């Protein structure tokens, strides 16, 4: 595989040339994303169906972009919660990295969203009291929101070895990014309105244009009062 030179963003690329069979969940999520986009540059977030990545769900996550170089977890599998020792939803992706690696992570995130590009990181866990030094692998795959902007990421994180003392944080041992088909400069070929499906345990609501309010769904929650109680 051809490696992209990340040095202009402060990220050093030294990535293994062959797929690592020790991280099958990473391969499952990548293969699912590749099949889902079906020739387009980036699939839609609303197309994600957890049944397609059932064997990798505990390692899978969805990110939402909240700043040019920052993204937070919208959803995350149990493996990520175990690594940090708490619920990670709402936390930034950089929470999983040691302070010295966070600027590199931010640079990679920026390229994933703006390219759009895919990214794969090799990671080395902290060592010391209660930490034996895990080995990790993470992929970041761009997604479009219902509005069509690339502001979501489908990701997978696998840490090998005993977790030990939490929170478990990682340094970056290697990184590789690659453009999607055509990147932002090619022909995305994506539909104007994404298929609406329920995926990855998060409600997806279709965009309602002004003037079409009559077609919006009524709220499912009602307040019921009984005078007899």
Image: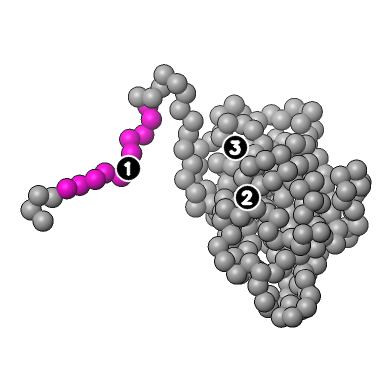
Q: Measuring from the top left, give residue 27's x and y in whole percent.
A: 72, 58
Q: Which residue is mark 2?
A: 72
Asked if residue 97 shows in the view, the reply is: yes
Range of magenta residues:
215-225
Query: Which of pointers 2 and 1 lies earlier in the amino acid sequence?
Result: 2
Q: Position of residue 61 (x, y in %)?
A: 62, 55
Residue that badge 3 annotates: 145
Q: Is residue 226 left or right of residue 3?
A: left
Q: Nearer the viewer, residue 17 or 208?
A: 208
Q: Secondary structure at mark 1?
A: loop
Q: Is residue 36 visible?
A: no
Q: Secondary structure at mark 3?
A: loop
Is-magenta flag for residue 194? Answer: no
Q: Secondary structure at mark 2?
A: strand
Q: Report the residue that reaches farthest toward the left.
A: 228
Q: Is residue 181 above or below residue 225?
A: above
Q: CA distance from mark 2 to mark 1?
A: 28 Å
In this orientation, which residue lies closer to the viewer: 39 or 108? Answer: 108
Compared with 137, 35 (above or below) is above
Q: Residue at x 47, y 23 (%)?
A: 209
Residues 115 and 171: in front is: 171
Q: Are marks 2 and 1 in contact (CB under 8 Å)?
A: no
> Where is residue 45 shown, x and y percent of the image?
59, 42
Q: Which residue is mark 1?
A: 220
């Amino acid at each position: 595989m051809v490696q992209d030179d990340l040095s202009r963003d402060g990220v050093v690329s030294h990535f293994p040339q062959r797929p690592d069979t020790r991280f099958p969940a990473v391969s499952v999520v990548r293969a699912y994303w590749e099949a889902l986009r079906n020739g387009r540059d980036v699939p839609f977030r609303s197309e994600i169906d957890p049944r397609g990545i059932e064997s990798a769900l505990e390692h899978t996550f969805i990110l939402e972009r909240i700043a040019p170089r920052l993204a937070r977890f919208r959803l995350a599998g149990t493996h990520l919660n175990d690594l940090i020792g708490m619920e990670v939803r709402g936390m930034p992706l950089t929470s999983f990295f040691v302070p010295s690696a966070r600027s590199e992570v931010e640079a990679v995130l920026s390229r994933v969203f703006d390219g759009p590009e895919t990214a794969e990181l090799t990671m080395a866990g902290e060592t010391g009291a209660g930490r034996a030094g895990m080995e990790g692998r993470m992929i970041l795959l761009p997604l479009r929101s219902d509005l069509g902007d690339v502001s979501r990421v489908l990701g997978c994180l696998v840490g090998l070895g005993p977790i030990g003392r939490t929170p478990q944080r990682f340094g970056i041992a290697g990184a590789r990014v690659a453009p999607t088909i055509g990147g932002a400069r090619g022909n995305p070929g994506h539909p104007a309105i994404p298929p609406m499906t329920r995926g990855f345990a998060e409600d997806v609501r279709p965009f309602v244009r002004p003037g079409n309010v009559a077609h919006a769904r009524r709220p499912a929650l009602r307040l019921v009062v009984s005078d007899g109680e």
